Image (cartoon, rainbow, N blue to C red):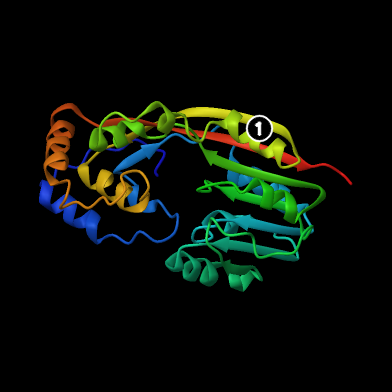
Amino acid sequence: MSEDAQTPHRRPFDELVAQAVAAPTEGWDFSWFAGRATEERPSWGYARAMAERLAGAGAALDLQTGGGEVLAQAPVLPGLTAATEGWPPNVEKATRRLAPRGVVVVASPEDAPLPFAGAAFDLVTSRHPVRAPFAEIARVLRPGGTYFAQHVGPSSVFEVVEYFLGPQPPEVRRARDPHTEAAQARAAGLEVIDLRAERLRMEFYDIGAVVHFLRKVVWMVPGFTAEAYRPQLLALHERIEREGPFVAHSTRHLIEARKRPA
């Protein structure tokens, strides 16, 4: 999403919703939100830090790469670079973007074993994986290799989730806890060398931004369609018009873990 505050759109509800429904949702390009929503960025600058590590790696794997947007930002890629993605439209988009740079994009479901030999990579990266398969990450890392990732944290954007679905149970709110994930990494044989978490402000300036967000980030409100949630959307549109931006908060954590040397 855009990082700069913008003036709210003052357009009819049906026009805003129709525009959001027509917008493509493939990949992790959030440029559509420019002027319509903002989100603070974590202080650690993941894309820059990831690029620095890629520049020093010999063989790297980017998990759940989306449309390859973050990996493509790196000025220098290792001679052997691979990426996985589970959603077919994103596989196609990532292949178009990354193949010219020599990256092999492999279609692989998020819950499947990684389709690579053991100890194949000295760096594994991921930005916002649905789930981090730590046992598989440890298996494909070489001794001394590193997993470097930015994860979505607990109760992320739950102001939006709970507006549509109501209060969520404690176990759902606690899912994706950074300390729990760090324990999972250690159990897989990785040494956690960095763990940082932040809560970041988001603002939605019109109802179209909310609709597009929920169409793009499909796990927030499973089965979401603008038609099915029209009454709630209309009420939220009127609230935004009356009170200003709908404020939510995302949570993110940086995790860096190293496979112990043999």
Q: How far across and down, in percent of the image, does residue 148 sit? A: 67, 44
At a point 64% along the width and 33% down the height, the residue shown is 182
Report helix, strand or loop for mark 1.
helix
Give residue 8's quadrant in the image.
Answer: top left
Say whether residue 234 is left or right of residue 42.
left
Compared across the picture, whether 253 is left or right of 195 comes to left
When the figure is inspected, residue 187 is found, relative to residue 145, above or below; the finding is: above
Query: Circle 1: is it few (<14), some (14-19), or many (20+) Cα within 10 Å?
Result: few
> Can residue 75 be seen in the rendering of this structure?
no
Residue at image x 54%, y 60%?
68
Q: Is residue 120 left or right of residue 214?
A: right
Which of 236 and 8 lies nearest the eye of the viewer?
236
Q: Position of residue 1 (x, y in %)?
A: 40, 44
Q: Residue at x 13, y 53 (%)?
A: 15
Do we see residue 125 in this rendering? yes
**Nearest the camera: 120 or 211?**
120
Figure check: 125 above or below 96 = above
Which residue extends farthest right?
262
Q: Amino acid at mark 1?
A: Ala
Q: Which residue is mark 1?
A: 183
